[in-house]
Image (cartoon, grey):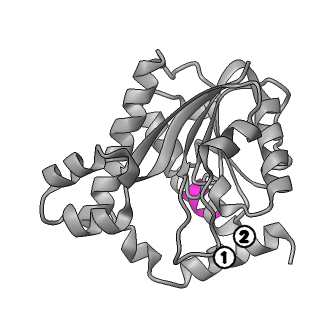
Amino acid sequence: MDEITRIKTAYAKRDSGNKKVLYSAFKTDSLFICQQREKALIGLLKKHGITDLSDKRILEIGCGKGNVLRDFIGYGARPENCRGIDLLPDRIEEAVRISPNINFRCCSAENIICGDEELDIALVFTVFTSILDMAMKKRIACEILRILKPGGIIIWYDYHMDNPSNPDVRGVRKKEIYSLFPGCEIHLKRVTLAPPLARAISPVSVILAQIVEKIPFLCTHYIGIIRKA
């Protein structure tokens, strides 16, 4: 099967399982992971002087139901400046139902309906790990850079490790990120305590989980800013 069909099939399989319960915000470990990611994200934006989002034009690649975009609206982005795209129609339908004031489209990130150098920020959260075809990854990376203004940024959050229990994803390591976005200024930081550890530790002690998360090799994701030259 082609890569797009494979991705859709993988997500359909995931949706038929127990992932909804696994990632529920009412579970201590899920809430811990989300809160720690948000803390890291806000710190990253502040570190790079991005504290006013009111005039930023933002696109999220693989937006799902729009949760990350809604977070950015909470940080000060204006809904009319926000867009989201996703391959899966059911996720876009749900995103539109929840947030009709945001422009959502069902399409592939290989062909983004957007002008050259039009946007300030592209959000890329757990997207590239779901793509196993390197040629497709490169086409999407080129397309993201095409739609960003000079000096525009990609906010990256994704696994850098493989998941042995999930053959439908593959970790994206630092070397690969640099190869996908050549000539860009890239700043990456390891975050997110490995989920098995988060599930074991955070229900017992959130403080202990926060301490353990400071050990870089126990973290499974990179969060970072990729700035277009």
Residue 176 screen position, x and y as percent: 69, 45
Q: What stretch is highlighted in magenta?
A: 93-97
Mark drawn on residue 195: none
Residue shown at 58% from the left, 56% from the top = 95
Q: Tag 1: Cα neighbours inside 10 Å, few (<14), some, or many (≥20)?
A: some
Q: Where is residue 65 in the image (x, y as percent from the top left)?
A: 55, 58
Residue closest to the eye, 96 or 161: 161
Instruction: Please tell me which residue is depicted at 80% across the width and 23% down the height of the picture.
Output: 117
Residue 211 % position (x, y) = 20, 46
Q: Is residue 115 depicted above or below 70 in this figure?
A: above
The local secondary structure at tag 2 comes to helix
Can the viewer see residue 108? no
Q: Residue at x 15, y 53 (%)?
A: 208
Task: Verify CB contact (< 8 Å) between mark 2 and mark 1.
Answer: yes
The residue indicated by pointer 2 is 7
Number of residues whose C-alpha sits closer than 10 Å to that of mark 2, classed few (under 14), some (14–19) or many (20 or more): some
The answer to whether residue 69 is above or below residue 149 is: below
Per the image, label 1 sits on a secondary structure element best described as helix
The residues tagged by marks 2 and 1 sit, at their Cα atoms, a distance apart of 5 Å
Q: Residue at x 42, y 35 (%)?
A: 41
Residue 91: percent from the left, percent from the top?
A: 62, 64
Q: Which mark is residue 10?
A: 1
Closer to the camera in the image, 152 or 186 = 186
Residue 197 included in the magenta stretch of the image: no
What type is the residue that disc 2 sits on?
Ile
| Type of amino acid at the residue the image marks with label 1 | Ala
Q: Horizontally, is 54 left or right of 200 in the view?
A: right
- Quadrant of the snapshot with the N terminus: bottom right
The quadrant in which the C terminus is found is top right
